[in-house]
């Protein structure tokens, strides 16, 4: 079994426009006579590699602790697309083959338009990962997010896929459990071993 970490370092990950960078402050230090090292973290629910809960764009939808855990585990296909592309339906056609979870590798700046989102919904996709900070371009965040999240699809954004070959893996990407939150950090991992997922 090979575990492939696809999680960005929280303090070094690209920051969504208008958000602040994650800050870690050491408040207790053994080197200064304290019994232990102890830190405070200042961050937001969509920093680094994170999940979007349904309620991020669907008011009254499930918050992060209410999202079904099976959305974050199981067979997942990594697909590479050209960088700085807006994916359309035709870019995805013929590439899913019955898979329910996909990871979009587009160099960090590839997004989807409404036709791509509708195609994934119609194909029964349950989980979408992307190496960009968002599944949608800045000028169409609301429509794309609403379409996907209202359909009950989980979103995992800001993963690292540069070191991952296209193909099928087992995804493990369970979010931290924060009551009522619209998102949460996640440690996302792909497992490269067919036996783990082929009977799921």
Image (tube, rainbow, N blue to C red):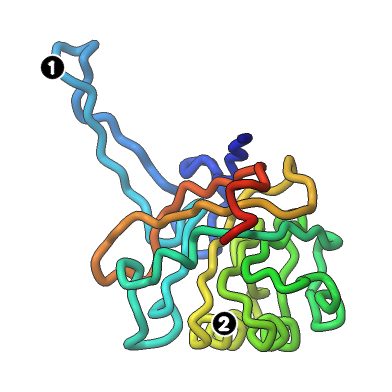
**182 on left or right of 142:** left
* Vertical arrangement, residue 116 with respect to residue 97, above or below: below
Q: Residue at x 42, y 54 (%)?
A: 185
Residue 167, how many percent across, how many down? Answer: 77, 53
Q: CA distance from mark 1 to mark 2?
A: 48 Å
Front in this rendered view, residue 46 or 138: 46
Residue 2, how many percent across, how many down? Answer: 63, 35
In which quadrant is the N terminus drawn? top right
Q: Counting residues from the N terminus, which is met first, the one under dot 1 or under dot 2?
A: 1
- Residue matched to label 1: 35
**Element on which disc 2 rests:** helix
Q: Which mark is residue 148?
A: 2
Front in this rendered view, residue 35 or 121: 121
Where residue 95 sits, quadrant-wise, is: bottom right
Where residue 24 sits, quadrant-wise, is: top left
Residue 200, how many percent across, how many down? Answer: 56, 61
* Vertical arrangement, residue 7 with respect to residue 47, above or below: above
Residue 40, how many percent across, how many down? Answer: 25, 40
**66 on left or right of 114:** left
Where residue 58 sits, quadrant-wise, is: bottom left
* Vertical arrangement, residue 6 with respect to residue 71, above or below: above
Front in this rendered view, residue 24 or 199: 199
Q: Residue at x 56, y 74 (%)?
A: 126
**Element on which disc 1 rests:** loop
């Amino acid at each position: 079994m090979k575990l492939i970490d696809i999680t960005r370092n929280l303090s070094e990950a690209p920051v969504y426009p208008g958000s602040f960078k994650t800050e870690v402050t050491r408040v207790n230090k053994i080197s200064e006579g304290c019994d232990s090292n102890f830190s405070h973290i200042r961050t937001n629910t969509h920093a680094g590699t994170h999940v979007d809960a349904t309620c991020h764009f669907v008011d009254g939808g499930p918050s992060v602790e209410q999202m079904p855990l099976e959305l974050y585990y199981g067979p997942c296909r990594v697909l590479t697309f050209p960088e700085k592309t807006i994916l359309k339906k035709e870019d995805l056609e013929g590439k899913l083959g019955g898979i329910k979870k996909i990871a979009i590798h587009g160099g960090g700046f590839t997004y989807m338009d409404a036709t791509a989102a509708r195609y994934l919904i119609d194909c029964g996709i349950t989980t979408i990962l992307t190496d960009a900070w968002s599944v949608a371009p800045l000028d169409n965040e609301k429509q794309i997010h609403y379409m996907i999240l209202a359909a009950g699809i989980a979103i995992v954004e800001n993963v690292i896929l540069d070191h991952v070959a296209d193909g099928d893996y087992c995804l493990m990407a369970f979010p931290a459990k924060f009551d009522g939150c619209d998102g949460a950090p996640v440690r996302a991992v792909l497992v490269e071993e067919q036996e783990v997922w082929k009977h799921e």
